[in-house]
Amino acid sequence: MMKNILNKPLKFRIYFAILLSAVALLLYIQLTPYVQGIKFLILYPIIFLIAWVSGLYPTLIAISLTTIIVHFRSGSSDFTEYLRLAIYLVTSICITWMIEYNRRREKEILTNLLKSTTEMTSIIEGMKDSFVSVDRNWKIVAVNRNYELSTNVSREKSIGKVLWQVFPEAANNNYNYWIESNRVMNTGVPVEFEEYYPPLNIWTEARIYPTDNGIALFFRDISKRKNAEIELIQNEKIFNKILKANEEKFESLANNIPQLSWMNDDQGNVFWYNQRWFDYTGTTIEDMQDQGWRKVHHPDYLEYVLRNFNNHLISGEPWEDVYPIKGKDGQFRWFLSRATPVKNEDGTILRWFGTHTDIDEQVKIEAELSESQYHFKRLADSIPHIIWTSKADGQLDFYNARYYEFTGVEQSNGELEQSWEALIHPDDYKRTIEIWNKSLASGTPYQIEYRFKDRFTGGHRWFLGLALPVKDYTGEIIKWFGSCTDIDDQKHLAEKIETQKEDLQNALIARDEFLSIASHELKTPLTSLKLHSQIFKKGVDKGIPDAYSAKRIDSLAEQVEKQVSKLNRLVDDMLDISRIRTGKLTLQPQNFDLNELINEVFEILNGQFTSSNYLEPIFKKDVESISVFWDRIRIEQVLINLLTNAIRYGNGKQIHLTLTTTDNKVFLNLKDNGIGIAKENLDKIFYRFEKIKNPNEVSGLGLGLFISKQIVDAHAGKLWVESELGVGSEFKIEMPR
């Protein structure tokens, strides 16, 4: 009842404390006469009771109230009275604090105990193991939920019962659970064991610990694990049989392969060799103990091989290397060594399996081939041609030094330049690729002439490209050997020879044409002379008086002079052609007045203008007098040729000649209004023996314009024509002064 007061509200506990204080004061008043010396002792039990049942704050109120009433009731003010009051007050407060501290400490201990008990109960209930605790009288005092599930016995039917009442088999002293439990109960030493439990037909793993009142038993069902272990043991026996059979097969197979085989562990320690190894090296299994394989490795390669293989032990990557191994005859042969890691399911390396393949002959062949390639490279670098090789698919794999010298490409050990687009002339590149691809597809020899860019001049040079396929014994192409030969000089020489050949052929044709024309042109004035001489002779022979008349003689002389002039002109033209062809056409420049020369030419040709029904040409000039330093006779020849040509093709229409000058040049334009010249013939009329076909024109060698152009060119001038059919022609001369 008293403890329940602490659970009451504070107000109730204060009233209760005041009530007890009043009772104490009444007792104090009544008993004071009898206990004068110890009157405060009457109050201490009441204060203790109030502190025990009401708590801290009601007790402090009670102490204060009783102290005040006792002080006023005594009516004394001496020091002894105050000292008593002070002792009472301090003592009461100390008693109250001690009671309150003990109460709170007890509450804290009870709370922690409750918490620990709850946590322990929760842990026991939550564990996967089954739990049962018995006291020293073997009564069951506690179980957990898994105990009920695994034994099929409820908590109510277990707690408070003796162990063998719940589990009758526990009464059997030979039963292992009883033996181990009894040992822990007696010795206090924990035990742990595995036991098959027949009543439940399960395997259990048990742990028994001593407690203050008995023992605590933990056990769990391990049937799955035990069954798996049993099955594993059975499977291991089967596996060992299979493994032994496989090892025998592997041993037989490994001993019959041509390679030397070996195995080592994940640390690199060799633990097995096949028979081939022992046959080749002449060693025994005892010789190979403690890294005995070092004895048959070449000392120059041993450290390198070890370092390389150890790196692969760390990385776990397959290993491959080439090095010599000594045979039982003491000779070293080259072997290709390979090793592959053998891993389990999680990728852990268990062992390494390795082989040594004899490649001694191959290494020697490669060495010879390397030496051959060295000599080939030296030979290729020593010749003046570009040499190259490619694989069967056309991928280039070698250039000689001449290629790098000519192209300026920097030589490197990396991948070779495959495209020649920057080297080959753009007009030749597409054709080059087409011919090369055709040869690759058909296997036919490759041949082409193309132009390469010359890095020294910026121009291009002609090369002859050749390539032949190299085939193996089956006829398959394995390589292409090609060359590029500089034929630029030969090409230009051939072009020059071809040009000279063409010129020679044209010269022969021109010669034949010239002989034909010259014979006709020479025969015409000679025939005329012969006719006139025959007429004159006939008149003389017949004694005709008119044959000796002055008029007849003058006419005959005029005709003779005219025909001789034609012959002279023909001979002069032929001589000029000869001089031009041999480069002996020379100039004799002198100062003269060009206007005077033009007027003199007009006078020379005046008879031709008149006989051809032409008016005298119109001559326009921008200066009255102009002095030039030219070959006067040759320029006169040019003017006569041009004017004569205008008379022939001018259709009798008046000719116009214009002279203009600048500070350093002279321009002459000779224009007629005749038949004109077709555009395709504008250049041809300056060729030798070229004439415009005119039905009325039968004379002339066709050399006048050709000779005129050569004379003007020799003066560093230009002569050209502008013309239109049916309108006329305009010959233009531009000459330096």
Image: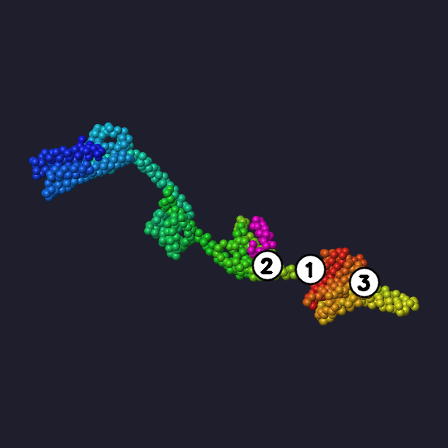
Instruction: Determine the image quadrant of residue 350.
Output: top left
Q: Residues within 10 Å of mark 1 (few under 14, many from 20)?
A: few
Residue type for callout 3: Leu
Q: Which residue is mark 1?
A: 502
Q: Which residue is mark 2?
A: 460
Which label sits in the foreground, 1 or 3? 3
Instruction: Determine the image quadrant of residue 103.
Output: top left
Identified at 75% across, 56% down, the residue is 725
Q: Nearer the viewer, residue 599 or 283?
A: 599
Which label sits in the foreground, 3 or 2? 3
The mark nearer the N terminus, 2 or 1, is: 2
Q: Which residue is mark 3?
A: 615
Using the numbered discs, state the Cα–Cα distance from disc 3 to disc 2 in whole angstroms.
Answer: 59 Å
Residue type for callout 2: His
In terms of secondary structure, where does tag 1 sit? helix
Which label sits in the foreground, 2 or 1? 2
Q: Is residue 379 above or below residue 88?
A: below
Q: Are marks 2 and 1 in contact (CB under 8 Å)?
A: no
Q: Nearer the viewer, residue 280 or 663?
A: 663
> In the image, 132: left or right of 595?
left
Residue type for callout 1: Glu
Q: Which residues are magenta?
A: 421-448
The mark nearer the N terminus, 1 or 3, is: 1
Main secondary-structure element of the magenta-colored stretch: helix
Q: Nearer the viewer, residue 297 or 12?
A: 12
Q: Residues within 10 Å of mark 2 (few under 14, many from 20)?
A: some
Question: In the rendering, at what x and y percent does residue 620 appear?
Answer: 75, 64
Using the numbered discs, state the Cα–Cα distance from disc 2 to disc 1 in whole angstroms.
Answer: 25 Å
Residue 447 lies in the magenta stretch: yes
> In the image, 563: left or right of 625?
right
Q: Residues within 10 Å of mark 3 (few under 14, many from 20)?
A: few
